[in-house]
């Protein structure tokens, strides 16, 4: 008897999302860097208010996918649509570089694994948050201060240190500044690229708590990339498993972790357990 | 047969030291700079008989503009009689046949280091500012390619952030000279190290301004009647230096940008920075008939 190892192309959705229109839709995404095929015909759908976890081994294409979502890079081919209020940009990869950048600055927030990628270390923490607002055109100093304070507060950053430089802060605090910067403009989509990697377990838990609270209170749609299945299990509603640039399995988090279908996912889950 | 019989008789073919092709290139870049106000145009900065950093950029623009009918004024930090100003003025005059003057009202071309004259300039005058560093983003982005991309994207968030940080750390904006300014609502330029006092003089001015950096090989321009807006937060107004109430110790005039002269007893006295304006005021006080033009600032308040 042969076992069918193929995975259903239509992922199951939590009941509350069954009737919802997708916020993010990516279709047929492929990207090569020389001989390396980083993404192969990847399809992703993310619904409003959900947390989509992306897991996979190093080099599986997780970060490339996130860069595409943040419009930092464009694929060789593929289609990317974001359902934003009062605008229809079509395939975002067809937009000019400047338009992509502006769209990303206004509607997408990102937290990098390495704070040096996301923060200006020589500027104050509040200044880092303010930079985002300045790019969006805010020109009132008092409003900048107030919004930066609010964003840092929402990220559970100690406000008495809001003018400290990130270089003077711990790793966990730096991630909170990144998070405050990412949510300052209340983005439609928050991308998290291994936000807790390199932090000790207690700090990891605090950052995850903050993320969960933000998600609960503000209903921010998140895409969380991590190789730590524990983090994904804690945070994600749905999971997308990647290997060699392909999506090998996707589904509800419980389903993927309890009953993995693809051999690679089984290996991943059992290796963790 | 002699060399003379084989060659054409000597004849002047070009005014102003630079050869015709150099001037043609500069003219094209200057026209482009006028067409895109505030945008830096690269040019092949030539050798001139002066060290880089002493005004070679301004000199090349002036030499391209000048003709025997021109009248040249050269200012160094407000003064016409500095060694550098005098040498440049004499050189331009010698190679072009242009007239020399100290009087802002008489000049057709004013080359200046770090000051805009106090008397209002007219439509038929051109101001050439010497610029040490034409890139306003240099302090926030050392990579020139990225800085160029930032200009293309009008991405000036980091410049604003620098001002934000100054307000956070010092409670006020500390940028004294070369205050970054938005030209025609599009490009941010550095107006050369002119004091904050002088920046409003460029806004909607009647005259054409060229800003040229010889060492950095770039020039930009502010055409007549073009908006030049210093970057300021909407709730933190732009402030010029507090010189409104200072009085010049030599000429007795007040309400203009002053040079501070430290005294032995620790106090300071002041002299008007635009030396020609001071001289005119002294001569008028002595009873001479002197024509002093309208000034940008009146009673210490900008009013042009």
Image (cartoon, rainbow, N blue to C red):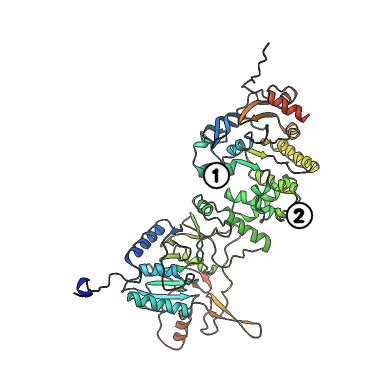
- Which residue appears at 45% of the width and 77% of the height? B85
Q: Residue furthest right?
A: A202
Residue B124 appears in view: no
- Which residue appears at 69% of the width and 53% of the height? A125
A87 in relation to A15, above or below:
below
Q: Which mark is residue A160?
A: 2
Q: Nearer the viewer, residue A84 or A3?
A: A3
Task: Please provide percent x and percent y for residue B211.
Answer: 45, 65
Return the disc, 1 or 2, that comes first in the chain's sequence: 1
Q: Are marks 1 and 2 in contact (CB under 8 Å)?
A: no
Which residue lies under the disc numbered 1? Answer: A102
B132 in relation to B235, above or below:
below
> For the C terminus of chain A, which image quadrant?
top right
A264 in relation to B37, above or below:
above
Task: Please provide percent x and percent y for residue A33.
Answer: 55, 38
> For the N terminus of chain A, which image quadrant?
top right
Q: Quadrant of residue B32?
A: bottom left
Task: Please provide percent x and percent y for residue A39.
Answer: 58, 32
- Which residue appears at 43% of the width and 62% of the height? B221
């Amino acid at each position: 008897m042969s076992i069918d190892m193929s995975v259903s192309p239509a992922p199951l959705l939590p009941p509350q999302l069954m009737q919802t229109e997708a916020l993010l839709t990516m279709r047929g995404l492929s990207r090569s860097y020389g001989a390396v095929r980083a993404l192969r015909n990847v399809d992703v759908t993310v619904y409003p208010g959900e947390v989509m976890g992306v897991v996979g081994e190093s080099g599986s294409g997780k970060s490339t996918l996130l860069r595409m979502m943040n419009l930092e890079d464009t694929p060789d081919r593929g289609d990317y649509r974001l359902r934003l209020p009062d605008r229809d940009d079509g395939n975002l990869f067809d937009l000019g570089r400047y338009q992509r950048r502006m769209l990303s600055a206004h509607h997408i927030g990102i937290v990098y694994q390495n704070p040096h990628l996301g923060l200006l270390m020589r500027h104050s923490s509040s200044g880092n948050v303010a930079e985002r607002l300045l790019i969006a055109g805010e020109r009132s100093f008092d409003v900048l201060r107030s919004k930066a304070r609010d964003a840092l507060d929402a990220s559970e950053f100690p406000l008495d240190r809001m003018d400290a430089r990130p270089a003077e802060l711990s790793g966990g605090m730096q991630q909170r500044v990144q998070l405050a910067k990412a949510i300052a403009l209340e983005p439609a989509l928050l991308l998290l690229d291994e936000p807790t990697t390199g932090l000790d377990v207690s700090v990891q838990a605090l950052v995850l708590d903050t993320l969960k609270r933000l998600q609960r209170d503000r209903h921010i749609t998140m895409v969380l990339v991590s190789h730590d299945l524990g983090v994904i299990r804690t945070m994600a509603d749905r999971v997308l498993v990647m290997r060699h640039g392909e999506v090998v399995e996707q589904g509800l988090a419980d389903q993927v972790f309890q009953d993995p279908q693809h051999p690679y996912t089984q290996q991943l889950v059992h290796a963790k357990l | 047969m002699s060399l003379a019989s084989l060659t054409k008789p000597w004849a002047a073919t070009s005014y102003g030291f630079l050869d015709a092709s150099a001037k043609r290139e500069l003219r094209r870049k200057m026209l482009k700079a006028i067409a895109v106000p505030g945008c830096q145009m690269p040019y092949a900065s030539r050798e001139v008989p002066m060290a880089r950093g002493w005004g070679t950029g301004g000199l090349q623009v002036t030499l391209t503009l000048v003709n025997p009918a021109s009248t040249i004024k050269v200012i160094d930090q407000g003064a016409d009689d500095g060694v550098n100003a005098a040498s440049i003025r004499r050189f331009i005059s010698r190679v072009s046949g242009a007239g020399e003057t100290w009087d802002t009202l008489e000049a057709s071309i004013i080359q200046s280091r770090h000051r805009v004259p106090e008397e209002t300039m007219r439509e038929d005058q051109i101001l050439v500012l010497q610029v040490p560093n034409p890139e306003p983003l240099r302090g926030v982005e050392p990579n020139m390619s990225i800085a160029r991309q930032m200009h293309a994207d009008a991405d000036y968030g980091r410049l604003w952030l620098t001002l934000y940080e100054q307000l956070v750390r010092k409670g006020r904006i500390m940028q004294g000279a070369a205050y970054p300014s938005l030209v025609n609502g599009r490009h941010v330029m550095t107006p050369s190290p002119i004091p904050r006092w002088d920046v409003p003089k460029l806004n909607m001015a009647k005259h054409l301004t060229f800003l040229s950096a010889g060492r950095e090989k770039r020039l930009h321009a502010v055409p007549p009647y073009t908006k030049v807006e210093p970057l300021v937060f909407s709730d933190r107004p732009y402030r010029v230096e507090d010189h409104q109430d200072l009085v010049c110790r030599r000429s007795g005039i007040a309400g203009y940008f002053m040079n501070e002269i430290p005294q032995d007893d620790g106090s300071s006295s002041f002299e008007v920075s635009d030396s020609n304006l001071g001289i005119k005021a002294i001569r008028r006080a002595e009873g001479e008939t002197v024509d002093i033009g309208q000034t940008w600032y009146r009673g210490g308040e900008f009013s042009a």
